[in-house]
Image: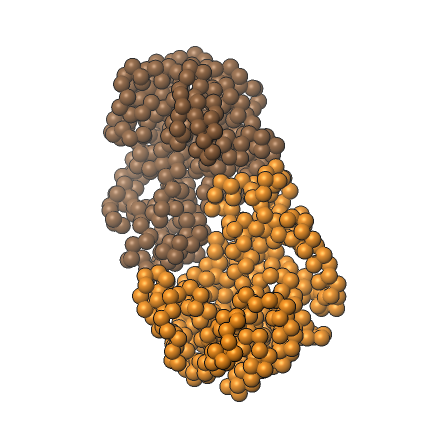
Chain colours: A orange, B brown
Amino acid sequence: MIFEVKEKFDNIRISKLKINDIEIETPIFMPVGTQATVKTLSSDDVWNLGYKLILVNSYHLYLQPGEEIIKSFGGVKNFMNWNGLLLSDSGGFQVLSLSDIREIRDDGVLFKSFIDGSTHLFTPEYIVKFQEILGVDIMMTLDICPPYGIDEEELRKFTNLSIDWARRGKSVKEEGKGYLFAVLQGGLNLNLRLKALEELEKIDFPGYGIGGLSIGEPWEKTKELLQNFVKNMPENKPRYFMGLGDPISIMDAIEAGVDMFDCVYPTRVARNRTLLTKYGKLRITKSEYKFDERPIEEECDCYTCKNFSRGYLHHLFKAKEILAPRLATIHNLRFMHNFMENLRESIKRKNYFDFRRNFEKNYLNKYYE
Amino acid sequence: MIFEVKEKFDNIRISKLKINDIEIETPIFMPVGTQATVKTLSSDDVWNLGYKLILVNSYHLYLQPGEEIIKSFGGVKNFMNWNGLLLSDSGGFQVLSLSDIREIRDDGVLFKSFIDGSTHLFTPEYIVKFQEILGVDIMMTLDICPPYGIDEEELRKFTNLSIDWARRGKSVKEEGKGYLFAVLQGGLNLNLRLKALEELEKIDFPGYGIGGLSIGEPWEKTKELLQNFVKNMPENKPRYFMGLGDPISIMDAIEAGVDMFDCVYPTRVARNRTLLTKYGKLRITKSEYKFDERPIEEECDCYTCKNFSRGYLHHLFKAKEILAPRLATIHNLRFMHNFMENLRESIKRKNYFDFRRNFEKNYLNKYYE
C-alpha cells in the first residue's frame, strides 16, 4: 500500500492511495455493499459509476453466505465479481446495533444471529482471520462503539478494550493479506482519543478508522472534536471516518483532515425515494413531479438522468417497480462520486472554500422541500 | 405494417413483420412490461437482450400513471424511453382477473380500481382511444374472456359480444395511429371460433389475437383446437396467441401456425427464483447451489451467466437482495430470446422437428428437479 499526501492547505489534504495496481485519490467516498452487493447494483454497475473502492460488512457476510462459502469461492471479490478494491468493517458496530447481544467479554463479543437466533462469538483474532478469508484490501480491528451519552468510566473502558482488541487483532494478522487499520474510539473526549491514538501508534497500524462518531451526538461537537483531533493523527497514513455520508458533514470532516468516508446514506435514501441533487434533496414521489419531463438533475451525467424523466421515476416508485430503487441508487451514487470529484478539484485549484460556499448555497436552499 | 410469410412447411411459418423502420422475424416472444417497465429492467436493458417488440398492459397504465400523464409525455414510448415497437392489450383480461367487476354490460365493462376502489367504465371505443394515446404500434380490441368450463350459451354470448366490441372498436380507430388487432374468443369450440373468425374477417383487421386459451383448460384440448383452427386464419396476417410463455406449449402453437406470443412467465418465475435453462428449470435457492461456481448455464451468453455464479445468485436470493430478481430476469429473458432464435433457425434449416426433439429431451429431463 502506498499512501502519499500530494497537496495540503490548512488541514485539508489530497492524497494518493495505491493498492496493487489500483490508484485512488482521496478524500474519497465508498459505497456500501453490505451483503456482497451495493443494493440494487452489480459490481460492474458500481465500477461504471466511477468507484474503485467499496465496503462490505463482515457481520452480514459472516452470517450469510458465511465463511465456508466465501473461502470456497476464493474471497468475496471473486464471489461478487468485483475487480476494484475492497474494505471490510470488523462487524463490531453491527453486532451492537443489529443483534441481541448476549455479552461483551474481554475476549470478544457473544451475539445472536438476526437470521436464525444461533449464538456466535466474535473475537478480535477471529475477525481478522475472517477478513483475511474475505480477501479484502483494507480490514478493520474489532471494536466496541460506546453509545453517545455513556458515562466516562464506561467510555474509557470500551475505548481501552478497543485498543486491546486492536493489539490482539494485529498479533494474528498475516503479512501479505491486506492491510489492517485500527479503529479509534473515545467518544467526544479529546484526551481519551489522543491517548488511544498514542497507544495504537505504538502498536503501529497502516491506517486508522475514526469510530464512534455520528451516532446521535450533536454534529457541532463532533466537528469541534475532529478539528482538534484529526490533525494529531499521523500525516502519512489514511484517516477514515466510519459511517459518514452527508455531503455537508463530509466537508466538515475533510477540513479537519479526514481522507476516507463510507455510508449507506445515498443508497438507503435512494431506495426510500429521495434523490440527491446540487439543489438539495428531491422527494420524487411528491405529486408535483407527476408530469415533470425533466431529468432529476439537468447537469447530471448519470444513466438515470440521461435516459429518464422525473415523471417516469415518480410513476415507477408509485407503482412499486423494482426498477425505481435501482435508477435512484444509480443517480445518488453518481451524485456522490461527482461531488467528491468536484471537491478534490477545488482543493487542487485552491478554491475549495468557494466550492463549499457555492455548494451549500444550492444544496441547503430548501428548493425541493 | 408489412407482414410477409417467408417460409412455410406444414402449418409452421417464418414471417417478416415490419412496422416503421423496425423489422422483426416471427415466430416471436414478447416480454411483458406491465407498468411501462419489464419488471427489474430499463428499456435499454430489454433492447440489449435482443427484444424489439414488447407488450404493455392497458389496464395497469390506465390506472397508474393514467391517461393524462401518458398523453402529456407524448405516449408510453417516450415515457419509458423505449425505441422499439410496442403492443398493448385491451385490458379486458385484467379487468376480469384483477378487478372487482361491477358489471359486464353491452356497452362495456364497469369495474373498480384495484388501487383506490374507484369505479371506471371501459367501452370498446374508449379502449381503442386509450391505446392511441399510449401510442403503441399494435393494439387489441376490448374482449371478454369466458372462463374455462362456462356453459355453451354463455360462451356464445361472450364470443359474440367480443365480436361486437371489435366492430365498435374499429369504428373509432384513427388511421395512422397504430394497427388494431381483433381478439378472437370461442373457448375450445372450433365451430364457434371459425364463426367468430368469419365475422371478424368481414370487418377486416390487420391481425388477430387468439384469446381465451391457456386459462386452466387441459393443454391437449387447446393443442387440438389450435391444430384445427389456426390454419383457417388468414395467411397474410399475424396470429398472436395471447398469454403463452412455456417453451413446449409455444412449440405446439407454432406447429399450428401461430406467429406471436407474450407471457409474464419467464419474468415472473425469475423473480420467484426459478431459472430457465436448456436442461430444464433450475430452482436457485436449493442448498446444492450454495458452493456452485458455475454460471446458471455454461453455454448461455447472457450478462448474468458471463459474470456471476450460481453460488452468488443463491446468496443474493437468500439475502433478499434486489439484484437477485434482476439478474434472474436477465437470464430468463435471454433464454427465451435464444430459444426463439434457435427455433426460427431450425425452421429455416428444415430441421425444426430435430430441434424440438432435442430441446425436449434436455428441457424435460428433470435434471434439476
Front one among A104 and A178: A104
Q: Residue furthest front?
A: A151
Q: Residue at x 71, y 68 (%)?
A: A348
Q: Residue B264, image x and y in percent?
A: 39, 38
Q: Residue A86, image x and y in percent?
A: 49, 68
Q: Residue at x 29, y 30 (%)?
A: B216
Q: Residue B78, image x and y in percent?
A: 58, 36
Q: Is residue B230 visible?
A: no
Q: Residue B332, image x and y in percent?
A: 39, 45
Front one among A275 and B17: A275
Q: Residue at x 62, y 65 (%)?
A: A249
Tell me: A66 left or right of A223: left
Front one among A26 and A254: A254
Tell me: B151 left or right of A129: left
Answer above or below: position of A139 versus B172. below
Q: Residue at x 31, y 57 (%)?
A: B289
Q: Residue furthest bottom?
A: A202
Answer above or below: position of B260 versus A268. above
Quarter location, residue B189: top left
